[in-house]
Amino acid sequence: MQHLRQTTLEKRDRIFAANSNPVFDRAKANIVWREDLYNDVKQHLDAIADQLAIELQEQCSILIAYMTEQLWGSSQVESRLIDNSDYYLEKLQHSLRVLYLRFARPVAEALIRSPVKSDTRRSIIKNLGVDIEILDNYYSGDEPALRVLKRYANYGFQLLLDSALRQEVLGVREITSLIEAFDEFKNPEDEVIFEVETDIKIFEEYLQFAVFNAASLESYALQELQGLLDKFRDLKGAWDGVAMNEWYRGNPALLSELPAALQPQELNLEVSDRLRQLGTVIAQMQTGLSGSP
């Protein structure tokens, strides 16, 4: 999100300049800036989902490493649990994109894509599916203005800072601590900047305190780890063969746990040759003794 803010700040001045001739067109600049920002947000959401998949894969690797250690470091453990690590990552990325973007993208549609009180935003809010209403049930933050996403999307930052409006709509007069209050805007540019930056902040708030929970990402991660553990247990018969293979190849980690009688004996060729020679000499002596009068 910090990178997203930096990117949009770099583009803002260019967009404002392009919409300031002969005077600053507040409405047009707001729309153009948000369209550009919305495209960046979609890319960032994809990146977040992919990063979540990478982090989950790392957790899976830690679990597999532990199970591998239980089987004396055998290279066969991972290959039996995960056939192809690249394909496995792709599967995680696909699953997490479906779960995460199901809720994250509608929030971006409602808050980022178009200005507050615009016809486009009203249309988006009206057409949002039940996923947004489900999302309201998962908001765990403290700000009452955000407990219903559609309501905040309709009113915008005024619902955070206008005490009279908060009393009328929310039943509370205290203004929010999520953003800094203001007295009045010095120019139209400042108002557009405040509106967009506030929506970015609230978008981040929803990602942290609603989307993650609604998408059940933690449950999915735990299920994936539990699935690997169950598969490890189900392959109990296969691990007997793995243990035998490790014994045959002389895995020192395995051999160190075996009693001496079960450990393979090393053959000393020099000693063996001397014993053979000694055996030949003894046999000759026995032949000579048996032929004596």
Image: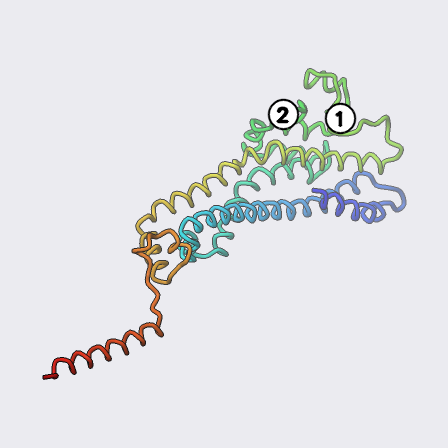
Identify the residue at horizontal 54%, vertical 36% (top origin): 215
Q: Residues within 10 Å of mark 2 (few under 14, many from 20)?
A: many
Residue drawn at (71%, 37%), measured in percent from left and top?
200
Kindly state the secondary structure of the residue where label 2 is placed: loop
In what quadrant of the picture does the C terminus appear?
A: bottom left
Kindly state the secondary structure of the residue where label 1 is placed.
helix
Nearer to me, 119 or 189: 189
Quadrant of the snapshot with the N terminus:
top right
Q: Residue at x 33, y 68 (%)?
A: 267
In percent of width and height, residue 187 lies at: 88, 35
Q: Residue at x 34, y 72 (%)?
A: 271
Residue 293 vertical position relative to residue 275 in the rendered view, above or below: below
Q: Is residue 45 left or right of residue 226?
A: right
Q: Measured from the top left, where is residue 152 in percent x and y?
A: 68, 28
Label 1 sits on what residue type? Gln
Crowd rating for badge 1 (residues with CA inside 10 Å; few <14, some 14–19, many 20+)? some
Residue 110 placed where, x, y %? 65, 35
Q: Residue furthest left?
A: 293
Callout 2 amino acid: Arg
Which residue, given by chain and number where applicable, does mark 1 sit on?
A: 158
Q: Quadrant of the rendered structure where residue 223 is?
A: top left
Total label count?
2
Residue placed under numbered mark 2 in the picture: 147
In terms of image quadrants, where is residue 159? Answer: top right
| Residue 190 in which image quadrant | top right
Query: How far is disc 2 from disc 1 in space, using C-alphas?
Result: 15 Å
Tell me which numbered mark, 2 or 1, is placed earlier along the sequence: 2
> Where does residue 171 sit, x and y in percent of width and height?
68, 15
Decide which of 194, 138 is in the foreground and name it. 138
